[in-house]
């Protein structure tokens, strides 16, 4: 029986509660596919500060290093907000994790389940029966990190820079991702005015020849910001550099109207023929205000576990099972408080997890 | 009687037709406010290429130079698309005009008239009774023009750069604009990661002390892309650098659902106590496919004339008159073909202009 080791870092706030539900669902997946998960828990964020003096203890890093992938909950809360910024749970845990494990790619799906389409700020005619757009964002390069940058009070400057290798690396991941979805890739750039983006388009176009089964097109970032509003269903996978991905992934997630439902993945470079190591976490925060009440929505955490199965373990069908199970439970009218609407049946965190697991 | 000289550059496609309607409306404004307009026509764009061999003849530049402001129609069409890019109507006319007259600021309102709110892709509950957001975009600096930039096929790079003076110049214009609207200004930046934007926030914050009557706040660009979708009515004036303004003004215009209705202004720096020289034009294109049929919507051109009155001539009340006249005609159910909906009365370009002029 194949065994996978998953580092489980629940963190703070609602993290531990929703993580328990994700583990329930993963246990059912193990049974169905005749494999086993070895969950190795570790402290991260505020709880790690309290217990070990820092947001990312060495032991936690070691636990992650030994794992096939990391399932991350959420970190932070008012208790740690008075610490210096770099010691706070978010900065002190996530930035070092990205760096240590070379997590250069951010995958952020913007999903509208048909059962929750009312939540979108867009009209029903545009949402149709829901949508599922994947934004693939380069996370370690571009203008946020390019050198030189500075500000002497008279002049401020930053450098947008990408090498062909960096573009090819994220491009390849986007093509592979599109291949495992609906094989349509839109590469976002601003090649009409930015030299960096001229190179971006050259590299992605050339790479496209290796993926003849993926339909590739190019779109300027300002037009993409419009098209997401006009017709988000036109997109399957959107490939973006760091800054454009920051802007468009946020816009796309807002268009779903269900920010608390969205998972995300941060992936490392994979060796030839292997799947990438990755860290999987809900897009939302730790929601300390509702922690411990058993009312948090575990779906983002469960979907994050689903992404882990798909993108780090190659279990595409298991991801589809989880997605379908969530749809099934939503179809039956079950809702946690955050997505409750008239006529539906309100349930708690644990029951939502049980019901989803029950459909695997 | 005060006389203003307005350079009238109708250009190509529907430009001449809709310009005629804007002139009608301006004539009524002249009568109402006991002033006179001296319209000085000049060729620009494709027609200038045909008649004079270039998109922006010297005579046209001279005509603009002698005017208080420029009312521009639209340029371009299939006839000139085979020319080299820099000779084509758009690049060959607008870019030089911007440069010659130092048009460093772009004002792009995103207006949803209550009568046309159905056109927005956003839900009725979000649109409410319509909105009117003004995006003030710096147009001559930032990463689109910053040096160095380059691409050798291995590495591509661009430089985002702003000086404190450049930021103060556009900032002042944004504060002045907010003062003549609803006195709320949101400055868009990314000060958490970009050094240029740290300076941007410093300069704008300091400038805010000179405008205590304007409520100033700051918002990251990725959040702004979300907030425009979530609740556009929260905004009065949004101040942006060149690239962020490019993205957000397009997103904001798409949210109106009526791109063909929107005016724009490009303004020069004004001397102390004076109003800026400016070029005013519809946001949309020359629509050669419907040119000459008398069915084009003249409202964007008429609103552009209204902006000219307000921003270059200081006639704020005349702008309000035009805005109210458009609302009045829409209230009566009159629509051009592009904004026609069931139960409304379809009319042509000339009748729309007559009806709006009739309400001044
Ligand atoms: Mg963001
Ligand atoms: Mg644009």
Image (cartoon, coloured by chain):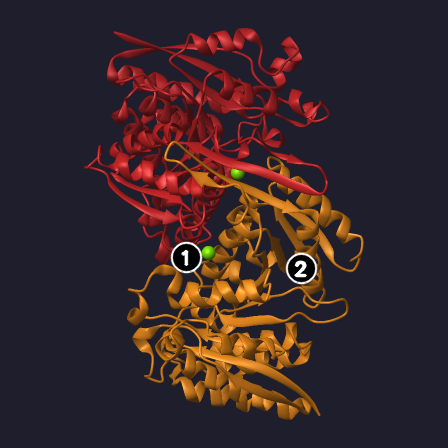
Chain colours: A red, B orange
In percent of width and height, residue B109 lies at: 55, 65
State the residue position of label 2: B174
Q: Which disc is residue A123 wearing? A: 1
Q: Residue at x 49, y 36 (%)?
A: A260
Q: Can residue B76 be seen by looking at this rendering? A: yes
Q: Dot 1, how many residues are within 10 Å of its Cα: few (below 14), some (14-19), or many (20+)?
A: some
As measured in the structure, the alpha-carbon distance from the residue carrying label 1 to the one carrying label 2 is 32 Å
**Which residue ends up furthest to the left in the rendered image?**
A213
Q: Quadrant of the C terminus of chain B?
A: bottom right
Q: Looking at the picture, tell me which residue is in the foreground, A236 or B13.
A: B13
Q: Is residue B72 above or below residue A235?
A: below
Q: Which disc is residue B89 wearing? A: none
Mark 2 C-beta closer than 8 Å to ligand 2? no
Q: Can residue A133 be seen by looking at this rendering? A: no
Q: Secondary structure at mark 2?
A: helix
The lab-note entry on whether marks 1 and 2 share a chain reads no
In percent of width and height, residue B326 lies at: 53, 80
Q: Nearer the viewer, mark 1 or mark 2?
A: 2
In screen coordinates, is B126 left or right of A127?
A: right
Q: Secondary structure at mark 1?
A: loop
Q: Is residue B161 above or below residue A125?
A: above
Q: Quadrant of the N terminus of chain B?
A: bottom right
Q: Dot 2, how many residues are within 10 Å of its Cα: few (below 14), some (14-19), or many (20+)?
A: many
Mark 1 C-beta closer than 8 Å to ligand 2? no
Q: Residue at x 66, y 64 (%)?
A: B269
In percent of width and height, residue A11 lies at: 55, 19
Q: Residue at x 43, y 54 (%)?
A: A226
In percent of width and height, residue A307 lies at: 36, 27
Chain of residue at mark 1:
A
């Amino acid at each position: 029986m194949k065994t996978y080791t998953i580092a489980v870092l629940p963190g703070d706030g609602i993290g531990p509660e929703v993580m328990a539900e994700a583990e329930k669902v993963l246990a059912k997946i193990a049974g169905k596919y005749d494999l086993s998960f070895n969950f190795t828990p570790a402290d991260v964020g505020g709880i790690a500060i309290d217990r070990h003096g820092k947001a990312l203890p060495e032991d936690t890093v070691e636990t992650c290093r030994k794992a096939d992938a990391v399932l991350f909950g959420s970190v932070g809360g008012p208790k740690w907000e008075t610490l210096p910024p770099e010691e706070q749970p978010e900065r002190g845990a996530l930035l070092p994790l990205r760096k240590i494990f070379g997590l250069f790619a951010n995958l952020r799906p913007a999903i509208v389940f048909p059962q929750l389409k009312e939540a979108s700020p867009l009209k029903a005619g545009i949402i149709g029966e829901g949508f599922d757009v994947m934004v693939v964002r380069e996370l370690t390069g571009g203008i946020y990190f390019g050198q030189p940058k500075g500000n002497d009070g008279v002049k401020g400057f930053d450098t947008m820079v990408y090498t062909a290798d960096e573009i090819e690396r994220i491009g390849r991941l986007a093509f592979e991702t599109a291949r495992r979805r609906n094989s349509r890739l839109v590469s976002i750039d601003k090649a009409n005015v930015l030299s960096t983006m001229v190179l971006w388009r050259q590299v992605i176009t050339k790479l496209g020849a290796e993926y003849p089964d993926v339909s590739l097109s190019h779109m300027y970032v300002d037009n993409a910001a419009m098209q997401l509003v006009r017709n988000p269903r036109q997109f399957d996978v959107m490939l973006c550099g760091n800054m454009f991905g920051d802007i468009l992934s946020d816009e796309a997630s807002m268009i779903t109207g269900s920010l608390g439902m969205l998972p995300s993945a941060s992936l490392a470079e994979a060796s030839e023929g292997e799947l990438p190591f990755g860290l999987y976490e809900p897009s939302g925060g730790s929601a300390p205000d509702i922690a411990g009440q058993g009312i948090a929505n575990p779906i983002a955490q469960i979907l994050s576990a689903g992404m882990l199965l798909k993108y780090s373990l190659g279990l595409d069908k298991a991801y589809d099972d989880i997605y379908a199970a969530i749809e099934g439970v939503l179809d039956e009218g079950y809702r946690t408080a955050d997505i409750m609407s008239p006529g539906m049946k309100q349930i708690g965190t644990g029951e939502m997890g049980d019901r989803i697991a029950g459909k695997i």
